[in-house]
Amino acid sequence: MSMHKYLFTSESVTEGHPDKVCDQVSDGVLDEVLKQDPAGRVACETYVTMGLIIIGGEITTTAYVDIHELCRKILKNIGYTHQKYGFDYHTCAILNAIHKQSPNIAMGVDRGGAGDQGMMMGYACNETPELMPLPIMLAHKLARKLAEMRKNGKLKYLGPDGKSQVTVEYHNEKPVKVTSVVLASQHTEEAVDKKTDLFSEDARHEIIERIAKPVLKEYIDKDTKYYINQTGKFLIGGPQSDTGMTGRKIIVDTYGGTVSHGGGAFSGKDPTKVDRSAAYMGRYIARISSLPVLPINY
């Protein structure tokens, strides 16, 4: 019997990526509303660019949320604490543009139904203990390791923005090894080689040895290729370099492209928004059953 081989790639982003910053702010608003008002209706969208965050959407609730204070707290926790990162929680402008939910949508939800329709996907597989596809889980673990090494001060030159990408080789539908790794991390001048004006070889070696290899040790070999800040350097990152919006990382937030996606994002939405709750229920059913893919139609 011939062996079927193929490569599959998934990516993840760090907490300081502009799109993921927006996801966290939107979910932070949702969390604060639901803490005070479990029946609150929340559809919160966030937009970030250089020096500015706009928080909008539809919220109907008895709760009170100090949007400005909450947003700055989230940015501080992410690590945008100094102008050297191109964005600073102390000084950025925050615009609150939230209003109430449309009464036309509320009509359906008030009767115990959904205010929208669409297709939501739930999926589970046995490639990892999390019952998730291996490529996306490895990409997530690399992104988390970048944040960990930055926050604990072991690699002080790392900045909040970053991405990870992992390519896995499959044999007969089974993941066998990682063939290549891409890591892009925002950094300070400390990691720039003064002679070449590029990301230094020492820093590159550190990221491979202290982040990539410990995370991927079960799946790498001598042929694994590493691409670290391959464009040269990543001094200007975060909202200074890239506009972010809630819901633009839906493949990162789900299964890394292993299965189809219905198109609806998750962040900032309360359980009456079936984009989120139905996708979560589909995933729950897939986990406890033998069904690998379970579309749910509304």
Image (cartoon, rainbow, N blue to C red):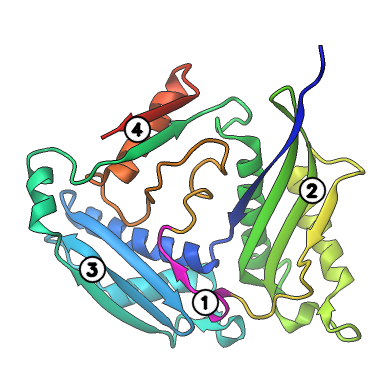
Q: x%, y% of residue 190? A: 77, 81
Q: Is residue 214 magenta?
A: no
Q: x%, y% of residue 16? A: 55, 67
In primary-sequence order, the first of circles 1 and 2 is 2
Q: Nearer the viewer, mark 2 or mark 4?
A: 2
Q: Which residues are magenta?
A: 238-247
**Cα–Cα span, label 2 and label 3:** 44 Å
In the picture shown, does residue 113 fall above or below 140? above
Q: x%, y% of residue 195? A: 91, 86
Q: Residues within 10 Å of mark 1 (few under 14, many from 20)?
A: many
In the picture shown, does residue 105 fall above or below 149? above
Q: Which disc number belongs to residue 239?
A: 1
Dot 4 corresponds to which residue?
A: 281
Q: x%, y% of residue 289? A: 44, 18
Dot 3 corresponds to which residue?
A: 65
SS label for mark 3: loop
Dot 2 corresponds to which residue?
A: 180
The residue drawn where x is 46% and y is 79% is: 49
Q: At label 2, which amino acid type do we have?
A: Ser
Image quadrant assignment for residue 3? top right
- For the C terminus, the image quarter is top left
In the picture shown, does residue 92 fall above or below 77? below
Q: Residues within 10 Å of mark 3 (few under 14, many from 20)?
A: some
Q: At label 1, which amino acid type do we have?
A: Pro
